[in-house]
Image (cartoon, rainbow, N blue to C red):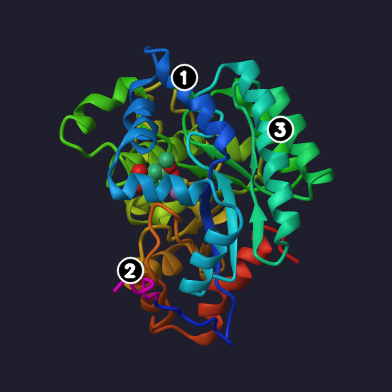
Amino acid sequence: MNLPEKKTVHPKSSAYQRIATEEAFAPPEMLNIYKKILEKGDADPGFRGLMGFYMSSPSARAQHIIRCLTDMDTLRIQHMDECGIDKQVLALTSPGVQVMEKADAVAYAQVANDYLADAIRRHPTRFVGMLTVAPQDPQAAAKEIERGVNKLGIHSVVINSHTQGEYLSDPKFWDIFAAAEAHDTPIYLHPNSLPKNMLQPFQECGLDGAIYGFGVETGLHAMRIITAGVFDRFPRLKMIIGHMGEALPYWMYRLDYMHRATVASQRYDSMKPIKKKPSDYLRENFYITNSGVAWEPAIKFAQQVVGVDRVLYAMDYPYQHQVDEVIALDNMTMSAEDKKMFFQTNAETVFKIR
Ligand code: 1DF
Ligand code: MN
């Protein structure tokens, strides 16, 4: 006899809302654009390895992920309810528009943001958004931030790490930072597949993806932004990094020591003095989410070294959605105040959720 699949339902908490802050979606229209890029044959190898896999693999994981990414209504909300997630902060899945040609990227970013705003209008108590922008055209990205804030009421931005091998540490991108600072829209620096000049030693052993390569490359990107002096130029700019800060909190001591030593030695033209220590910027300009890391000691370490007001909950739906992880985090040995900041109030502050 075929019984309906039994689902664990984890009830909502009366002590706090659970706001998951790194949750992905993909409009079918974007997957069609991806399909055309993949059909051309010269597609970026990291992109082919990642989205080429999810879009063509018959594996249960790939099929499930595509189904979840493309649902903005019943299935997504059912999955949220099963895990006791009150709200998802939604971002267009990696690499978003960053793999597209410039004009296509600029045009599709607007379409994706309108699509997201429509979903938020249908489910205003369940969904919050991050704006997609095309770093390929920094001035258009700056304009889209302005439109997103003023017309769509969305108050944060997602950028999926490098754009076709280029990093936001390059001043040619800094109009984006100027707009983000001016509109007080934090930028979530989310992972992307590895750029082609970094891919091979990771991919040949299967370590290029979310298991390790993503964190290495996104952590590198955050460090490039810090050491380029971005936060001296834009002191009120806020950035968010997932996956427990891509391990950077654990590195803070050595980053400070070696940054000071390297600057003093004048070894690199590209490493100029900056006003503060790298760890100061990590504490003062960054927020950290635990996406994919449902691990109490790592969360507590981050709270200890960057501050309880800077560590936020994230699930990383649909790439990692496990009700047992939500339960494990509910059961952390932590004061009621700190736990509420982690699950709810830090997200309300950073993403301006009202
Ligand atoms: C994966 C993970 C894919 C994450 C993602 O986007 C992604 C994955 C395509 O597991 O393949 O955003 N992630 O954030 O960890
Ligand atoms: Mn993610």
Q: Quadrant of the N terminus?
A: bottom left
* Mark 3, other Cα within 10 Å: few <14 / some 14–19 / many ≥20: some
Label 3 vs 2, first from the N-terminus: 3
* Mark 3 and mark 2 residues within 8 Å of each other at the beta carbon: no
Give residue 11's position: percent from left, percent from top. 50, 82
Residue appearing at x 33%, y 56% in the figure: 250
- The residue at 54%/21% (across/down) is 100
- Dot 1: element: helix
Q: Indicate which disc, 1 or 3, sits on the residue closer to the N terminus.
A: 1
Q: Which amino acid lies under the numbered mark 1 shown in the image of this protein?
A: Ile
Nearer to us of marks 1 and 3 is 1
Q: Quadrant of residue 12?
A: bottom right
Q: Which mark is residue 110?
A: 3
State left or right for residue 33 relative to residue 58. Answer: right
Outermost residue to the right: 150
Which range of residues does the magenta coloring cover?
Answer: 1-7
- Disc 3 marks a residue whose amino acid type is Gln
C-beta proximity under 8 Å, tags 1 and 3: no
Residue, disc 1: 37
Q: Amino acid at mark 2?
A: Trp
Q: Is residue 30 above or below residue 1?
A: above
Residue that badge 2 annotates: 295
